[in-house]
Amino acid sequence: MAISDRARDFWERISPRERGLVVLLGIAVPITLAIWLGLAIRDGLSDMESRNDKMRRAIDVVADLQARGITNEPKDDVLAQMGTEALPLETYLDKASVKAGFTFKGAVTPNGTIKRDGFVTHSVKVDFGDITVDQAKTFFQEIESGSKYVAVTHIDARRNFKAKEKLDFTIEVSTYSRDAVKTDSGSAGSGSADKKGG
């Protein structure tokens, strides 16, 4: 009640011209606030759209790299040059990350070894993050182009919780080599066959 009395006293004390200014101010303030709020919402939507575009580009890059890694069939000369010792993936990935401008915070975890048809697949799992789209692109390109016998076999990309413009990843990387045991037994078999033929 006291506030309304003060407002009435103030209104009666001021001149008609000042009353007009108060009314104009009362109209201008909500309009100004509405315009400001509209611009803030528009800027927020623009930022969100920009982040979504970056995420879409990142996903396109990752999908393209993964597709190339899966669809590239090894040629005969690649198989002929394949050794029996697997590349040390931890060192390989560390070099790729340095070239991309970041370092791993977590460890490279072995994810199993599979022997099949005379070949051995060694895989590791890596969790890393807080990197930009450009860093991710460079990193995956380094992995895929650094060796013919290394490929990214699984990718899980997420937007970083703290920095929305950055990404977090969980990936599986595999390297391929010949099975030394099978290669040796194959050679021995050939030799014994030659002796029998002789």
Image (cartoon, rainbow, N blue to C red):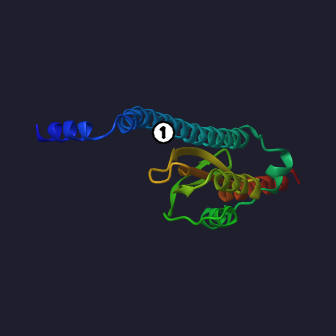
Q: Which residue is mark 1?
A: 36
The answer to which image quadrant residue 89 occupies is bottom right
Q: Is residue 80 visible?
A: yes
The answer to whether residue 121 shows anywhere in this view is: no
Q: Residue furthest left?
A: 1
Residue at coordinates 67% horizontally, 38% vertically from top-left?
60
Foreground of the two, 145 or 97: 97
Q: How far across and how far down the image is residue 143, in percent?
A: 69, 55
User: How would you rate the neighbour count of disc 1 (Cα within 10 Å): few for under 14, some for 14-19, many for 20 or more?
Assistant: few
Res 54 quadrant in image: top right
Q: Position of residue 174 (x, y in %)?
A: 62, 52
Q: Which sits in the foreground, 183 or 48?
A: 48
| Picture layout, residue 85 above or below residue 178 | below
Location of the N terminus by quadrant is top left
Q: Compared to 101, does 123 lie above or below?
A: above
At 50% across and 64% down in the image, what residue appears? 107
Secondary structure beneath dot 1 equals helix
Q: Which residue is rendered at x = 49% and y = 40% of the image?
A: 40
How many labels were placed on the picture?
1
Looking at numbered disc 1 in the image, what kind of residue is underneath it?
Answer: Trp
Q: Position of residue 88 (x, y in %)?
A: 64, 65
In this picture, residue 168 sits left or right of residue 152: left
Could you say which is closer to the camera, residue 11 or residue 103?
A: 11
User: Residue at the location (68% across, 42% down)?
Assistant: 61
